[in-house]
Image (cartoon, rainbow, N blue to C red):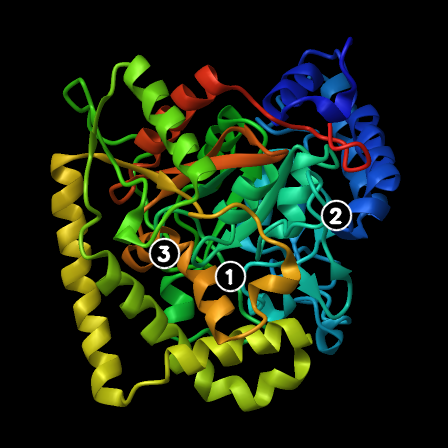
Amino acid sequence: MGTELWQLSATALASAIARGEAGAMEVLNAHLARIEEVNPVANAVTAVLADSARLAARDIDRRRAAGEVLGPLAGVPVTVKDNIHVAGSATTLGVPRFRDLVAAEDAPPVRRLRRAGAIPIGRTNMPDLTMGGMHTVSTLHGDTRNPWDPARTPGGTSGGDGVAVATGMTPLGLGNDSGGSVRVPAAFNGVAGLKPSYGRFAADHRLGDQDPTLSSQLFPVDGPLARTVADLALVHRVLAGPDPQDPRAVPVPLEGPPLPHPIRVGVAADPGGHGTHPHVLAGVEAAADALRDAGYLVEEVEVPRLQDAVDGYTGLIYTEFSLVWPMVSGLLTEESRRHVEFSMRQYPPVGLAEYLGLTARRLGIQRDWARFFADIPLLLGPVSTQPPAPPATMHSDVEANAATMGTVRLCRASTFVGVPAVAVPVGVADGLPLGVQVIGGMYREDLCLEAAAAIESRLGVLTPIDPRTNR
């Protein structure tokens, strides 16, 4: 094959293995070698699962030779964020406290990926306990570096997977998004990412038998990162569906009812009117032009009740954080601790009556967003209204922290509502990738993926990139 195996997409790799053009062990070894080559520079993969991965690859090659039917991801490597259980591997959450917390069984999405033939190849870096804001740095493993510019953040909290996918260490990463944590690393590293609807994919983030509190039940969703939208669509088909381990997951069809054409797309290039960087604005405009060219009806809109959604999101999260803060603050890096303390200063915990009022207000905001999507099925906007920043400047004081987190207000609002979104790259400016997101109504991942694919087909794929040469 003319292209190195580690440069191929997940879809291309699965097809090559199924046709016998490449072996699963050959594909695995190519990615293990790539990790050994570039991870010392990127610091994205925190543990390599070489032994178990080789066993799985050997079994796939045996089954293919025997003429057995293989799964849609047979032989495709995948990295897994360090807060998602992988059987036999420690789920450290980036802190020494959990370095020996070895999972007895896979989390639901990992189990589904394995059943489809995917091979977990490594664990990836994340901020301590996912509390590090928009930069990926952990006590156990240090800073993950952006392959486009090591002086800029790779985003968080699924930054390890974003960098691993962008640099060819893996074609697929499994992260989670609770306010942009898949979409931001996708945008900052020039790859694609899917935040599914609440209840679309089964998940289980328990440590032991302790279930999470309300906001941690409603907001975080596991989702894939990949270099192409087609790969996201493939993983979406694998991960969607109910699972007895997660009663929130629902049996919704993969595709919703057809819509009359042209499909309307609302554009919010500066959500909330707080300012968007010119390069980011140009990226949104390029995506809007691509959708027009693809036959969509594109128009400017205001995001319904954006600030109310952001206020509800922060009110629920930081009230719940305040209850556990004395127990967890000592487990975090200084950067992560500053971020949470500054955020709780900006969004002080509320009392019980106001907390309950926020849960009621959420339903009304969801209703208003549902009405919006009934009229305009898709919303196009920035993932972050600013390019990736130097990590030292992001959470240095209360004002910087507020400005940093304000750049992802559209991510926070869509998380609060629970709707799906696809992040897709749209170009490069000043040596840094640009990304946008396409947001849809509940369980309309199909519409988001189709629109993102239309953007990608006109604006191209940016990765893999070499972190040593930034090309």
In contact (CB < 8 Å): disc 2 and disc 1: no
Name the element at disc 2: strand
Q: Quadrant of the C terminus?
A: top right
Viewer-side label of 1, 3: 3
Residue at position x 54%, y 69% in the image:
206
Nearer the observer: mark 2 or 1; the answer is: 2
Q: Position of residue 44 (x, y in %)?
A: 73, 49
Label 3 element class: helix
In percent of the image, x 73 and y 47: which residue is there?
150
Residue denoted by label 3? 409
Label 1 Cα neighbours within 10 Å, binned few <14 / some 14-19 / many ≥20: some
Question: Residue, x 37% and y 53% (percent of image)?
Answer: 249
Specify the amino acid type for callout 2. Gly
**The quadrant where residue 191 appears:** top right
**Mark 1 element type:** loop
Residue at 45%, 85% in the rendered image: 322
Q: Amino acid at mark 3?
A: Arg
Residue 122: numbered disc: 2
In the picture, the disc for residue 455 is none
Which of the two discs, 2 and 1, labels the residue nearer the N terminus? 2
